[in-house]
Amino acid sequence: MTAAKKLARVETYLEAGIVERIGALGAQVHGGGPVAVRLSTGTYGATRAKSCLVGPEIGDKVLCAIEAEGVFVIAVLAGREGAVTTIAAEGDLHLQARGGNVSVCGSEGVDISSGGAIGIAGAEVHVRAKKGTVAVEELGYFGRLVQAEVAKVALVAQEVDSVMTRLSQRAKRVFRFVEEIDQTRAGTIDLRAQSLLGLRGENAVISARVLAKIDGEQIHIG
């Protein structure tokens, strides 16, 4: 008697079985679903029920609903010790907590990966970690305000281009080391030093189109 004829003669009931084989997505086993389950009356091709989010593995003990339409795996009862538990769904998977929060916790770590895009949207985003690493080939940031408080910043870059309307900097000590060219073009330049202003170079050229003025209580040239 074939598996289809056996199932056609029974009413719906529950039975535990062992997963013997798992076919590819959409494949059929013994005329049924892609999961081959060994039951008391034989091995049947079963389909994982939509509510059974844990993906069965070979050797797992599963609970099946047997009816005339076929065999459905409705729960994974037990698996190999130490095996990874995988929550899998065909198509899109949406997690929602109405009126509450959703927490994802892992004592050793949490990994989020995707072959496509990953989107995060919310009224606020908080990230807290002792150490962090970000590796992005291209990064675009659009925002209204950036506030940062750090003890030390180290930046290594091939090129840096900045375009801004206003730039204000306050520092106790500033050291700049330029190997080749340091060029400044501005409408007005005002340099003021409370104690000493030193300009030194192998060659120094000061030129003015209209007026060049040197003023001081003492002027030493040469």
Image (cartoon, rainbow, N blue to C red):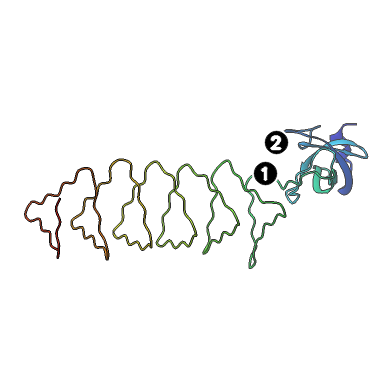
The residue to which callout 1 is attached is 90
Residue 37 drawn at (x, y percent): 84, 38
Q: Seen in the image, is 198 located left or right of residue 220?
A: right
Neighbor class of circle 1 (other Cα within 10 Å; few <14, some 14-19, many 20+) is few
Q: Are marks 1 and 2 in contact (CB under 8 Å)?
A: yes
Residue 95 drawn at (x, y percent): 65, 56
The residue to which callout 2 is attached is 25
Neighbor class of circle 2 (other Cα within 10 Å; few <14, some 14-19, many 20+) is few
Q: Find numbered disc 1 in the image and state the secondary structure of the residue it sits on.
A: loop
> What is the number of callouts on the image?
2
Residue 126 drawn at (x, y percent): 55, 61
Q: Find numbered disc 2 in the image and state the secondary structure of the residue it sits on.
A: loop
**Outermost residue toward the right in this view:** 40
Residue 215 drawn at (x, y percent): 12, 62
Residue placed at 14% from the left, 53% from the top? 221
Q: Which mark is residue 213?
A: none
Q: Amino acid at mark 1?
A: Glu
